[in-house]
Image: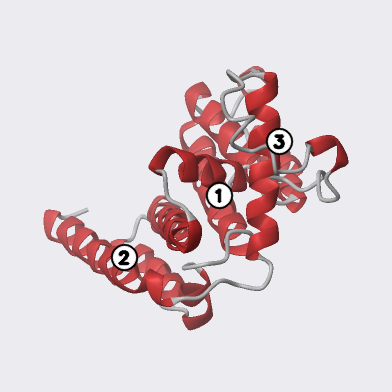
Amino acid sequence: MRVSGRYFAAAAFVVYLLAGVLIYSDYAVSWDEPTSRMNGLVNLKYVDRVVGSGALQEELRSIPDLSTWQDRDYAVAFELPLAAAEGLTGVEGERIWPLRHLLTFLLSALGVFAIYRTARLAYANQAVALAAAILMALSPRVFAESCYNSKDIAFMAAMAISTWTLTRVLISGRVEAMVLHGVATGFAIDIRIMGVVLLPLTIILLVIQMVQAKRSGGHVFR
């Protein structure tokens, strides 16, 4: 890839980031966002009690216990860090929502970057890769919801990241690439259970490579 192409892609991504950072706070709270936030807080209280110092128990005393919470079966791979971010930054009241929206947008931006990298690896074409990322970033519905939707957009970004890591596995075959793909897959599954489709997909594609003699059986299983 030419240096000019790298600079153009970097400039486009910076413009996208700046646009999101400048307007993310213009979006209001979605109807189910308070429930999503509570899911994160309930799990934060549980984690603090079981594997943490317990220092948050008094602060979170009004938060329901996980054992009695009606939505305790919801995945919280993204909601839990969002809840933790509230405590780490010390934001309270109405300032909580802009913080959540900013972090949601940043995860969405990482998903757009993953789409770019996936297309770059798959097609070895800078223009195609940039076009794929731009089409995703400029989709009006996706761009808007990337500023507040911590469930669907977070899952979309996680799937994009997992697709990128899977592409790296198929191209390089390196064990460390598979470990990273495992982490990305686990993150996607713990946002929405539909992410389990990545497990059979990964196995099927590796078996196809083995059948086509692109990878040895021992290497694939290792």
Q: In front: 29, or 81?
A: 29
> Mark 3 is on which residue type?
Val
Which mark lies nearer to you, 3 or 1?
A: 1
Q: Which mark is residue 21?
A: 2
Mark 2 or mark 1, earlier in chain: 2
* 10 Å crowding of disc 2: few (<14), some (14-19), many (20+): some
Give the image quarter of residue 150.
bottom right
Reply above or below: 175 against 44. Answer: above
In the drawing, does residue 169 fall left or right of residue 192? left
CA gap between label 2 and label 3 equals 43 Å
Query: For the view shown, which residue lies furthest in the bottom direction?
Result: 140
Question: What residue does disc 1 label?
Answer: 163
Q: Nearer the viewer, residue 28 or 134?
A: 28
State the CA–CA distance, disc 2 to disc 1: 26 Å
Disc 1 crowd, CA 10 A, few/some/many (<14, 14-19, 20+): many
Task: Specify whether residue 190 is in view.
Answer: no
State whether residue 79 is above or below residue 216: below
Residue at which label 3 appears: 207
Quadrant position of the C terminus in the picture: top right
- Against 189, residue 134 (above or below) is below
- Label 3: state its secondary structure: helix
Q: Is residue 106 left or right of residue 193?
A: left
Return the x and y of residue 178 as percentages of the image width and height.
56, 29
Q: Amino acid at mark 1?
A: Thr
